[in-house]
């Protein structure tokens, strides 16, 4: 806030904070209203399509508190890649989707967005493990594994590599984050994962997490909690 001859007024930053708070309040009201509909109809199942990397955090920090507050709710959790998550939401096979780097679509609305760094992950003992940050070109010069084309992470890394005139030649392609972590843990090579997917593994010293440079991975990475366009209001923009 700032004081002037006309009195006290919000600064530009203050207006942004106020707008953000109002949007969050509206989203929470909408979510509670939707959850209330499940309660009124006898405890229907909430179907959530989620990326594999979100599953553990969803159970601990999402469904745990939500289930305690609304014990009448039941949940079905399906693990899928970004494309499949969006398809399920659009076709009505999921009530909510949580995805990494989804492609914006008119058929869905993002009701919550968050930024999450994409990391290069390498085995302990790798020459790259001595650096706090590395260039994408350095990661691609060494053996690496990556998620397949159905996942937002693959699209993000491919786009960043293309912008730099680099080609992706992975040693291993897979649909499993667990397999990627095993690949790194076995000392075969590096990989690319969001920080939340590898933090526990890094703490156990089985791998070394390296934050990729902004130039290599960009700043458009986003995690979206999506619903069908007709079912959501007030998306964060």
Image (spheres, grey):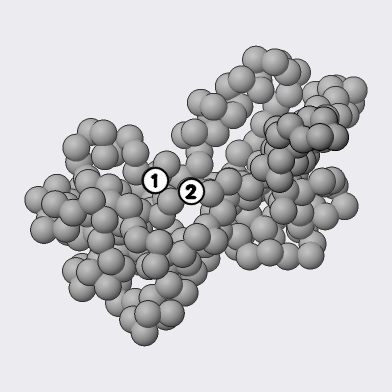
Determine whether 140 is above or below 125 in the image: below
Q: Residue 215 location, x and y as percent?
A: 39, 67
Residue that badge 1 annotates: 195
Q: Residue furthest bottom?
A: 165
Residue displayed at 26% across by 56% down: 133
Determine whether 91 is above or below 234 in the image: below
Pick the residue in front: 28 or 193.
Answer: 28
Category of crowding for the residue at label 2, using alpha-carbon neighbours closer than 10 angstroms: few (below 14), some (14–19), many (at least 20)? some
Of the image marks 2 and 1, the number of the one nearer the N terminus: 2
Question: Which quadrant holds residue 48?
Answer: top right
Category of crowding for the residue at label 1, using alpha-carbon neighbours closer than 10 angstroms: few (below 14), some (14–19), many (at least 20)? some
Q: For marks 2 and 1, give the CA distance.
A: 7 Å
Horizontal side of 127 relative to 84 (left or right) equals: left
Quarter of the image where the N terminus is located: top right
Is residue 71 at least partly visible in the picture? Answer: yes
Pick the residue in front: 232 or 16.
Answer: 16
SS for tag 1?
Answer: helix
Determine whether 129 is above or below 170 in the image: above
Residue displayed at 31% across by 68% down: 136
SS for tag 2?
Answer: loop
Q: Residue 40 location, x and y as percent?
A: 90, 23
- Total residue callouts: 2
Horizontal side of 36 relative to 146 (left or right) equals: right
Residue that badge 2 annotates: 116
């Amino acid at each position: 806030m700032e004081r002037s001859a006309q009195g006290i007024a919000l600064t530009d930053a203050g207006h942004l904070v106020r707008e953000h708070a109002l949007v969050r309040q509206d989203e929470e009201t909408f979510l509670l209203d939707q959850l209330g509909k499940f309660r009124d109809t006898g405890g229907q199942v909430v179907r959530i399509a989620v990326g594999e990397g979100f599953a553990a955090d969803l159970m601990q920090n999402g469904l745990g508190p939500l289930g305690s507050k609304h014990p009448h709710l039941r949940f079905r959790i399906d693990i899928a890649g970004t494309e499949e998550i969006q398809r399920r939401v659009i076709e009505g096979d999921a009530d909510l989707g949580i995805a990494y780097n989804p492609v914006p679509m008119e058929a869905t609305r993002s009701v919550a967005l968050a930024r999450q760094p994409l990391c290069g992950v390498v085995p302990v003992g790798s020459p790259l493990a001595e650096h706090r940050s590395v260039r994408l070109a350095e990661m691609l010069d060494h053996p690496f594994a990556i998620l397949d084309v159905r996942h937002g992470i693959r699209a993000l890394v491919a786009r960043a590599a293309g912008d730099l005139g680099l080609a992706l030649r992975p040693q291993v392609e897979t649909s499993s984050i667990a397999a990627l972590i095993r690949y790194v843990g076995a000392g075969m090579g590096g990989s690319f994962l969001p920080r939340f997917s590898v933090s526990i593994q890094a703490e156990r010293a089985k791998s070394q997490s390296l934050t990729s440079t902004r130039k290599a991975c960009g700043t458009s990475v986003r995690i979206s909690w999506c619903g069908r366009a007709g079912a959501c209001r007030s998306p964060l923009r």
